[in-house]
Image (cartoon, rainbow, N blue to C red):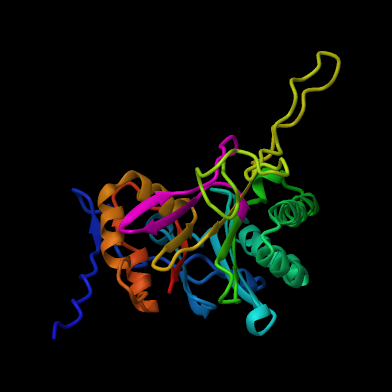
Amino acid sequence: MLGVPPQPPAVGHVGSRPPTYDAEPTALPPADPDALEDLVADTVLDGARCGTSTLRAVSVRGDSARYRGEPRRDALLTARFGTGEQALVLVAMATGTRAAPRAHRAAVEACRWIAGAVGRSHARLAEDIRGARRGDLKSGLHRLTDRSLGKLRAGAAEQGVEPEEYTAGLRCLLLPADPECRTRVFFGVGPGGLFRLRDGEWQDIEPRPADAGGEAVLGFGSGPHETAEGDRLTMDLGITTPPSPYEPAPRPPRAPFRFRASIARPGDTLLLCTGGLAEPLRGEPELAEHLTTRWSRREPPGLAAFLADSQVRVKGYADDRTAAAVWEA
């Protein structure tokens, strides 16, 4: 009888040259004894089983921040709302503004506020996901996202800083615990990536503001750009009309809201991540090949193996990395 092939070995980096910075943390961020609640751990790791899927999630301080003694600007929150097959799992990740002194705090607050909003509405959200009510999901999640980021803008005003200095990109994934429901919902604002590993090939399914997204339950690039009800699956709600010469110029448009819901197939791996992993995954083919080899097996990796995989370094990419991967049984 043939045995199970061994797990391919982990690697420290891919590409032609090693990265500039050390592979392990060097300098801790400075601490304020009167604000210890602002301390952010170098690494956060989590995981769970949800319905027919297995979740792994990680947030790691980037090589540059480790070297300079800066806090991790990425935040990660995982939460289960409800019980049994009616439960809904949320993964929220956020990235604070580069070089802003309170970036890490803004990212944490964005995750907590969206989690509170989703938690209070989880029963309705889970019902809409099971019923494939894409229009209700899209509009409802857009409102919840706007309200959460609006609280950051209010916080900026209270602190006397510009809104751009106290804000965050926010990306979320909703996973129903019902094993009969294979719909996975992504929503958020800001840069990052949404990828799917299917049949040994990576698919970049990040919704773009002007794309024809296809019907929500079918995924990227399938079907017409509008549903039978006439609603688009990816909406750019921040585009302004040309300014009138008789009115003050409008403020720059906010980043567009992004939404995608897709049906998972057995054997799929869905990956949601911030720009720190999305950029090297798009820019370095060796990283995509390595993760394909590591993550194409029937069994998902354990927490330690997932942490090692998510930290594979690429020269020229030194930002924080936050990722959530979902393996479908």
> Which residue ends up furthest to the left in the rendered image?
1
Count of number-bearing discs: 0
Answer above or below: position of 308 versus 274.
Answer: below
Give the quadrant of residue 93.
bottom right
* Residue 80 in picture, x, y percent from top left: 63, 77
- Nearer-the-camera pick, 96 or 179: 179
Q: Is residue 101 visible?
A: no
Q: Is residue 136 left or right of residue 223?
A: right
- In the rendered image of this protein, does residue 74 appear above or below residue 54? above
How far across and how far down the image is residue 196, in percent?
43, 56
* Residue 292 within the segment the image draws in magenta: no
Is residue 196 located in the magenta-colored stretch of the structure?
Answer: yes
User: Farthest residue in the front direction?
Assistant: 228
Task: Classify 260 as above or below 117.
Answer: above
Q: In the orientation shown, which residue stands out farthest toward the top?
A: 245
* In front of the other: 156 or 52: 52
Residue at 60% across, 48% down: 215
Residue 175 or 25: which is nearer the viewer?
175
**Residue at 37 percent of width and 64 percent of height:** 310
Q: Is residue 223 left or right of residue 294?
A: right
- Quadrant of the rendering where the N terminus is positioned: bottom left
Region in magenta: 187-212
